[in-house]
Image: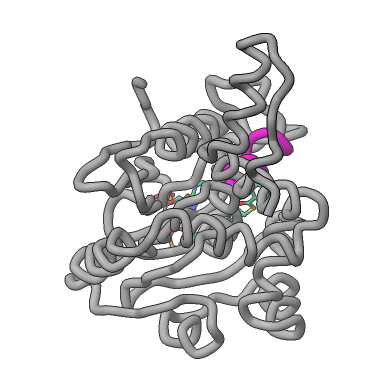
Amino acid sequence: MNFTEILFDKKNGVARITINRPEKYNACTTTTVYELTQALMDAWVDQSIGVLVLTGAGDKAFCTGGDQSIRAAGGYAGTVAALPLEVGWQQVSSLIRTIPKPVIARVNGYAIGGGHVFHVVCDFSIASHNAKFGQAGPKVGSFDPGYGTGDLVRSVGLKRAKEIWFMCRQYTAQQALDMGLVNAVVPHEKLDEEVDKWCRDLLEKSPTALKMLKYAFHAETDGVVGVTNLGVGGLSMFYETDESLEGKNAFMEKRKPDFNKFRR
Ligand code: 2NE
């Protein structure tokens, strides 16, 4: 895949996705957002990948949300001109939450607006000590409802989440740590070392247990979508059993399936 606004590399079981617009503090166009969905899907289906890392290029910003300089009626411009907000931004958050592998936000600077939502929906956030966090929607005439509000409430509580959204303040990495918005804060020069350590620790764990836990965490809050993901996670394991294969084999062999031996 040829990407123009993100970098995508895979090494030692880790897929690293880097938003690559440092001159715009890694603000996203629809092209960026579309490329993020493609990279996330790729890392999802690649069986050599156990952990994903999302980050921004340079040392100023993780991501500052939608690129305001190309914002137009109905959304953000880009070469994928017809990508509506609901398809692009919401899909990135949805994919991060649904991919059955841990996703770590490597927060290397500003995480603002839609960029803040991206780190909120990741499974873990590891921040550089100079990272800054905040929502900006009500300041620039936008809002990011659903994952952007719900997951934030679950991380920091309702009062604090409303403060973050309504007041559009910025918070330091230490404040973010204190309110449960990030998992760890390290000196900037130690960021990669720390992220690598989390990746290594996660890669040692059972991928199926991590997958089912991730789905279980969201099933409670995501209604039928959450139950579907948890259920289909179970279905993919059922497909590997002799009982499931008996149904498929019987169909192919044009005989009645014999499930009796599986009753227990
Ligand atoms: C991030 C922040 C606070 C940094 O401030 P500062 O003073 O340290 O830097 P500066 O000079 O503002 O930014 C550096 C360069 O990056 C560009 C700036 O325009 C500037 O470029 P030059 O003037 O040097 O050429 N830049 C930074 N963020 C940008 C952005 N989002 N779009 C376009 N260019 C950007 C400060 O820059 C800031 O507040 N940025 C704006 C944050 C923002 O409002 N984000 C959008 C929120 S809405 C959203 O993301 C969204 C949504 O709500 C719903 C759906 C989809 C998206």
Q: Residue furthest bottom?
A: 178
Give the vertical position of 183 relative to 235 (above or below): below
Give the vertical position of 115 relative to 176 (above or below): above
Report the quarter where the C terminus lies: bottom right
Q: Quadrant of residue 75?
A: top right
Quick check: can you spot residue 123? Answer: yes
Q: Residue at x 54, y 50 (%)?
A: 96
Prevailing secondary structure of the magenta residues:
helix
Residue 203 lies, in percent from the top left, at 30, 59
12 or 56, which lies in front?
Answer: 12
258 or 131, which lies in front?
Answer: 258
Residue 12 lies, in percent from the top left, at 20, 47
Quick check: can you spot residue 142? Answer: no
Report whether 225 appears left or right of 133: right
89 drawn magenta: yes
Query: Residues in magenta?
Result: 86-92
Report whether 166 appears left or right of 105: right
Residue 187 lies, in percent from the top left, at 24, 78
80 drawn magenta: no
Report whether 17 appears left or right of 190: right
Q: Quadrant of residue 161?
A: bottom right
Report the quarter where the N terminus lies: top left
Q: Residue at x 51, y 60 (%)?
A: 122
